[in-house]
Amino acid sequence: MKKLISLALIMVMITIMIAAMDLVPATTSATAAEAAGITTLYGSDGQFIAPIDPPEAGSVAISNRAQLEAIKNDLRGSYHLVNDIDLGGREWTPIGDNSANYGASAFQGTFDGQGHVISNMTITDDKYAHNGLFGYVAKATIKNVGLEGTYINIVKPGRLYAGAICGASDAVISNCYNTGAISAVLTSDAFNTFRAAAGGISGSYGTETMGVGATNCYNVGDISSGPSSSSAYGIGSSMTGCSPIDCYWNLESAQTVNGVTLEGEDKQGGDATVSLTSEQMRHKDSFAGFDFEAVWDIKSGVNNGYPILRAFARGVKITGNVRSHSTQNPATIVLMLGEKEISRTAVFNETRGSRAQDFALENIAPGDYALIITKPGHTSLTVKNVVVGGDDLDLTLDNRPEVREMALFCGDINGDGVINATDLTFLLSEFNKAPVNYPLADIDGNGIVNATDLTLLLSTFNRRNVVIE
């Protein structure tokens, strides 16, 4: 009886091989990224950065807290962020101070955030007169960085300056923002010699040597200071000869001086700054001077709707589904930009049989991609011309039928990209065996190679890897 079954299976195999036909070629349909006016820029870490100017030559890359702290070892150096850094609410020591002669102990270099965000910076230690990411900066450049979740709360005697970017500044600060709370309060000053200066960007900034002090910056955080002679400004108090350009602060954020909450016209942002309501700050046209094409962006649900630097702009989501067979292995979906892998995910069939599983790839920048989908024991599928613009992309709505209903074909047991006589031979060699030498021959994953697996393989015979242009 076994011989008769084997003979029958061989006859089926021969019949299939004779009748085998070439795979119907995949249809092609594409929209060129160039026609859509899309450009794509990637940093060395493969993450999307908008066309903010690249770091200056010789700049030191900063990717974590320890490297950020190490800036204090060379206060004249040039540095740039390569990713967002979460300081985790742990006490932060400001970089640079004014303990030596003018400028000697201050930060005097270049810090380029490249559009990234430093979050959850906390300063409560009363050791320092100048408090912020940087303490005191002199003839420096700080640009392209956002501070989110900032918490500065200093109570001390003597001089006191506090701001998200720096405590006090003789520097050019541009394309920066803060969303956290800053408080600087003096405990005693019997002779009224000192005052506290708190600001969203810098406690105080600018001299005649640097001129501008701040440009294209904003703050939405609460500001407080004391005693009554102190200042609590939305951006910061400016010195003689300094005139900030295009800097904005939230009129609805709290400003408190000596325990008294300021209202209306008593609120101040600093010389030449502009106050906006929360709603106004969620609209691009409120920010004269901000470059929303190359540097800034506003995205619903991100940063409470306030402007973000474009390197931190979350990209779009690509969604779709892919049909495959068996529960043994996942289908892996990889997004490629040329030879560079940008993102990947994997989905499992939860039950045996041919099932379509949804997938999603998130935070994808505009560009023209290829999507490669693989699964052990199946042919692969490559979808080219996956063009991402500014909106989420649902591939189930694609104009190419094979993309709307993506499928991997089961039966490629030896993984050579085509389901043919070799795979059939492997399956027959495992027929009714337990355990099997080739697990992928158990196509339906029920633990035994039987007639069901043979039927599945025959239904996909001569299928091969597919590329959709």
Image: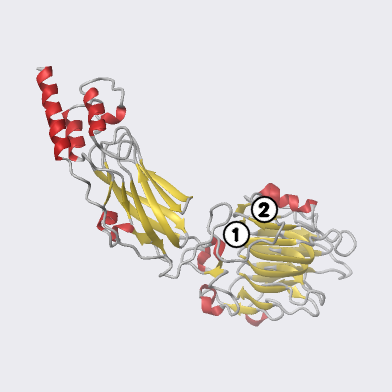
Bin the neighbour count of mark 2 within 10 Å (Cα to Cα): few under 14, some 14-19, many 20 and up: some
Q: Viewer-proximal residue, 48 or 57?
A: 57
Q: Is residue 286 above or below residue 387?
A: below
Q: Viewer-proximal residue, 236 or 66?
A: 66
Q: Residue at x 46, y 67 (%)?
A: 38
Residue corresponding to mark 1: 116
Q: Residue at x 30, y 26 (%)?
A: 438
Percent x, y for residue 232? 71, 71
User: Is residue 258 visible in the rendered structure shown here?
Assistant: no
Q: Which mark is residue 61?
A: 2
Q: Is residue 134 above or below residue 379?
A: below
Write down the quadrant of residue 441 in the picture.
top left
Write down the quadrant of residue 5 in the picture.
top left
Question: Mark 1 or mark 2, which is nearer the start of the sequence?
Answer: 2
Q: Amino acid at mark 2?
A: Ala
Q: Amino acid at mark 1?
A: His
User: Is residue 64 visible in the rendered structure shown here?
Assistant: yes
